[in-house]
Amino acid sequence: MPQVRIVARNFMDMVAALPAAKLDKLYDSSFICEAVLRSLPPLAKKYVLQMLFLDSPLMAKSMEEWVLPDGLSKHKVAIDRLLQLRVFMEVNDRKKEPSYKMNQKFQSNMQKYLTTGGTVPREPMPLNAAVRLPSVGELETYAMEQWECFLLQLINSSQVDKSTSFSSSMMRAFQRGLLNSSRDNEAPRLTENGFQFLLMETNAQLWYIIREYISSAEERGMDPTDLISFLLELSFHTLGEAYSVNTLTEVQRLAIKDLADLGLVKYLQGRKEGLFMPTKLATNLSVSLSDASSRKEGFVVVETNFRMYAYSTSRLHCEILRLFSRIEYQLPNLIVGAITKESLYNAFENGITAEQIVSFLQQNAHPRVAEKMPSVPENVTDQIRLWEADRNRVEMTPSHLYEDFPSKDLFEACCDFARDYGCLLWQDTKKMRLIVKGELHQQMRDFLRGQR
Amino acid sequence: MASAPSKLYQDDVSLVVALLDTNPFFWAAASLPFSEFLHHVIPFINSLLLLNQLNRVVLIATGTSSCGYIFDSGDGNASGNSNAVCSGIIKKLEDFVGKDSKIGKGSNGDGTRPAISSLLSGSLSLALCYIQRIFRSGTRHPQPRILCLQGSPDGPEQYVAVMNSIFSAQRLMIPIDSCIVGAQHSAFLQQASYITGGVYLKPQQLDGLFQFLAAVFATDLHSRNFLRLPKPAGVDFRASCFCHKKTIDMGYVCSVCLSIFCKYHKKCSTCGSEFNQAAPDSTIPDQKH
């Protein structure tokens, strides 16, 4: 069983884990307030909106009345999140009843946003005929290429044509947790987390890498708070506009080069100064992770005879598909493969679950089949799950075997004793043998001693 | 009648089509001036756009003789400076009201029809057409809902058209929320919200309109399963008759097409079927619809 699922929402957890003073400083910028608001669970967003223009604190009990009984768990999750991020502050009055008030700076920033509207962090450069700006489509292809190149280098350094300019220590930091080198002379193998990482959505993968980047920022002398605020600001820039590098601080300038390698921005040399253009990967950063529209078009068609056709030229896709299927041919625009028992067993050995494979296939379904319900044939999904269940046919419970009972009465008494505690697993009355769950062993011994 | 089940969405991306009542006869006599009203509505629209990057808001103005699109946040130029957007909305509203009153005067001659009601059926149809276009644009689209900000009283002559729109919305599973800013309840909108599974609210204090809008109408459809939202005390299910457009409680119903009449007719004006039963009182000549 894979241990920890990589939950890419950890970026916000990281923000929440910042010390209170730094977090309050972050809320000076209205963009961060917006980004934090957008990252909240839907119920929490509603609470923020409701409390936005209230000056006095509101009792926690009255907030609980806003939800129906089966929404209480979601309510608690939302309130916890708001408290973690210090958007809501707890106020204890004399009656010791908890009540919540909104963070002052957050509140004023949001009020200003609602009444006067949002602004952009910096002004784009005026159009300059000397420098030809790439179009939005070119930006997107650039972003995808960079990102794929980075991912390929992440999993297998030998396979890339051109490597990114990340230092090997940075790459090692990214690879920590995703790859482990089992032996020194062998290439590092992907761990379970690594497989899960590959099957995640691009946005989720991006957040994971950025999280690692920020965690290692302190070692490189960059203030993580600055980086976080810069990244969140980046998502509010307009796609396709060029911004001058001179408006960035020192830290941000260092970060821009790394971000260009990841495909978040495109770095250009203008006439007098450097320019950077945010790509779609950057502007989608603040979009909530559960959103569907940020995904690119799918490319996989799965047939009912377990054959798979992937219309893609990317080597990364080929590697991902190789994880759980047998690739048969690779044509200039098509990868043909088959989902077989051996390939799936291989995947399960490596820690991938059937659910991940099925959701990967469904999320990346080719537009021609995506409209059909279901997008992946049910016999294929059922069979994948059945093959996974095959590995769980045997269930092990630690237990003890009792035999050589002197008398039948003692045997019956022991059986009843075990049955009362619900720990009786098996009994053979003819040969007077008994198997009891391991946790009852001590009590069983005391019982037997008492009976003698 | 059971309310339409809401689809199980996991995310909270929404498309809100807001229908603003711009009937000048109503706003001239209303307790809340129209400019104040806009001061509540425009921040509400901003808050909807704030909640999620992919949320979309469309504004449709409901006039007395026509309806028109005022604002669509899905346009490319809608993002960026919000002051420009705000003044754009106000200018478009002014143009619309001017055009609407010209149309009203033109078709009525010297204004024989008092025109105290606004064209709700027209704006509902516009909203449904827009949403249908969104549905046809691809598999990934936000969850749509319609928000009616109504002040003028109901016009019984629009009963048939409004009920047809309500049933279309029910079939497409689009909730119709209603916020009444006028003095009296609206039977049409009560029925609309009840049938489609939306929320009907008549705020007690109009000064706090933004708070009511933000607390109730900004919730996305998925969260509505978990929240306690206002329910109307009772729904006014009265219909209007097809012949005189009067609101009636008891009347005659055609057994074929279920059209409602207040007086006995020999022949149904909608489907043309003849009723060969003896009249209970003096016969009334049937009227062509």
Image (cartoon, coloured by chain):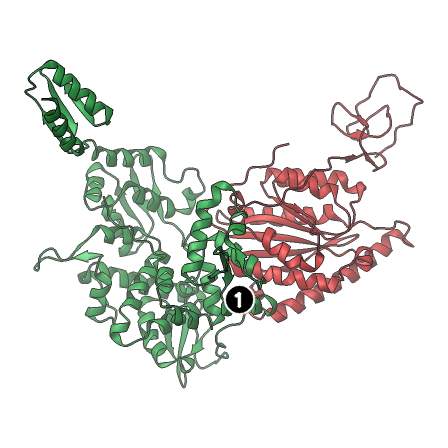
Residue underneath mark 1 = A107
Can residue B53 be seen here? The reply is no
A3 is higher (above) or lower (below) than A230: above
Chain B image colour: red
How many residues crowd mark 1 within 10 Å: few (<14), some (14–19), many (20+)? Answer: many
Of all chains in the rendering, the one displayed in green is A
The residue that appears at 32% across and 33% down in the rendered structure is A382
Q: Quadrant of residue A23?
A: bottom left
Q: Residue at x 57, y 60 (%)?
A: B47
Please provide percent x and percent y for residue B137: 53, 49
Asked if residue A162 can be seen in this view, the reply is yes
Q: Residue at x 51, y 63 (%)?
A: A102
Quick check: B266 left or right of A240?
right
Q: Is residue B30 left or right of residue B166?
A: right
Q: Position of residue A31 (x, y in %)?
A: 47, 69
Expressed as whole percent of the image width and height from the top left, the position of residue A409 reads 13, 15
Name the outermost residue toward the right. B282
At mark 1, the secondary structure is helix
User: Which of the pair A446/B211 is nearer the observer?
Assistant: A446
Quick check: B266 above or below A267?
above
Left/right of residue B75 with respect to residue A328 in the rendered view: right
- In screen coordinates, is A22 left or right of B100? left
- The amino acid sitting under disc 1 is Gln
